[in-house]
Amino acid sequence: MHSLQKQFHDFILSRHLIDKGEKVLLAVSGGLDSMVMSHLFFDAEIDFDIAHCNFGLRGEESNADEAFVRKWAEDHKVSCFIESFELEGKSIQIEAREVRYDWFNALTEQYGHHKVAIAHHLNDSLETVLINLTRGTGISGVSGISVLNNKIIRPLLFAERKDLLTYASNQKIQWREDSSNQKINYDRNLIRHEVIPILEKVNPSLHKTFFSTVERLSYTEDLLKRQVENIKKEFLKSSDLSCELNLEWINEPEDVVILSEILNAFGVNYATCREIFEAKGRAGKVFPVNDWIVTMDRSKLFINPNKEQSIQELIIDEFGEYNFYESIFKIGEAAEEEVSFDSAGVVFFDADRFKLPLKIRQWEEGDKFQPMGMKGHKKVSDLLIDEKTPLSRKKNVLVLESGQKIAWVVGYRIDDHFKISEYTKKIIKVSKSLISNI
């Protein structure tokens, strides 16, 4: 057995990439990497099919690649899926990747593949890290290409390209050379042909050193992810399509790393997270970020959709279920035994006083109502101040009107006029729940 075959076998076992009886779809371009991978799978007698994308970017070269892959599959009696795509986006590389992976996913669902194997090797991983470092990155960007990511496996990440060349030569494996790989107008090719050779002069064992380093960084990333999940579980709350993050756990500058991992989902970069750390405790500080408004309020951070448009009103002529402003409102009769005051999202009214049509709208300055249990009226704005409602959420508070009177400041208090009493004959139940959570 060739040493590369043994390393391939050991790497799959140690990283638990393929379980016994699983079927794998191999992404095969016809180049050195994917052809060596195909031979290794074939020699290991692993059940696999191959898939080839023809984007037509190199004219006849692309068609020759397709014919080469098709013939190899026929010679080795392996099922081969081939698809041609036309790319129209501004970034061809990004679009090609998205189209390719979408197609792979569709094939796995249709033909029952358990994994999709991509022929990235150690050189690819090093190039990716150097690109990320050049552009700026977090720990995930310096951890190299993932060996296993859901269904995607990369069983050659242990090997250098020179190892693949040696194996291909010994085994007389043919492949197609992509002429675009030699052009240095791409960042990756510039790093491959000009940067890495210089680094290898400093450290001739660069790739072996990198393999060891990236393994440790990968484990460090796993530890960070666990800590992030623990923090989110304890301190992050979702409400509607907004989030509330308690910042009590942030004490030291290094905590910004965890904050950055949490807020990355909202497009908040590391520099902004540093600003948030410095602004902790300053109420009202706002950080606009793409589709979100991030607001500091005391020791909490509130994250809300950045919606410039005002909320439209909803008129309700009959009881039933209604979707409005990313929430579900349910209105109908209820039995006496259903009455409960445990949830701010469920309220009960006296049916004789609760009249159709109803209106749900955004609250406005000057709105007043009589909170249940009070004798006088109170401004909605004062109620929200008393309830310490963050500035970022005030504008999204809704009111429910019946007969042009506010019956419920949604999520807060109902009006005393509409409450149920010992004289109530019929009860109306109104509930508000989320359509979805972040």
Image: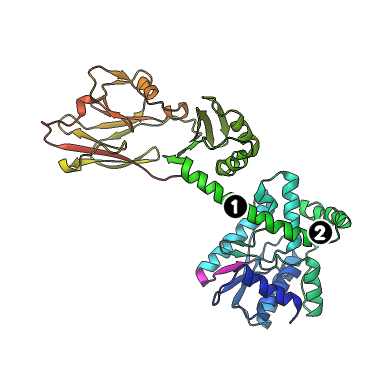
Q: Amino acid at mark 2?
A: Leu
Name the residue at 69% across, 66% down.
Answer: 119
Name the residue at 79% across, 70% down.
Answer: 163
Above or below: residue 341 compared with residue 31: above
Residue 178 visible in the current orientation? yes
Q: How is the image coloured?
A: rainbow
Image coordinates for residue 80, horizontal then vertical, percent: 62, 75
The local secondary structure at tag 1 comes to helix
Above or below: residue 373 compared with residue 65: above
**Does 29 lie within the magenta span?**
no
Above or below: residue 401 compared with residue 212: above
Q: Which residue does the numbered mark 2 point to in the structure image?
A: 206
Name the residue at 68% across, 83% down.
Answer: 75
Q: Is residue 26 left or right of residue 405?
A: right
Above or below: residue 24 compared with residue 332: below
The local secondary structure at tag 2 comes to helix
Quadrant placement of the N terminus: bottom right
**Does 113 lie within the magenta span?**
yes
Cα–Cα gap, marks 2 and 1: 26 Å
Q: Say which of 374 and 332 sits in front.
A: 374
Q: Residues within 10 Å of mark 2 (few under 14, many from 20)?
A: some
Task: Write down the region rendered in magenta.
Answer: 110-117
Q: Is residue 165 left or right of residue 95?
A: right
Q: Which mark is residue 384?
A: none
Q: Which residue does the numbered mark 1 point to in the structure image?
A: 223
Q: Say which of 248 and 59 sits in front.
A: 248
Q: Nearer the viewer, mark 2 or mark 1?
A: 1
Residue 335 visible in the current orientation? no
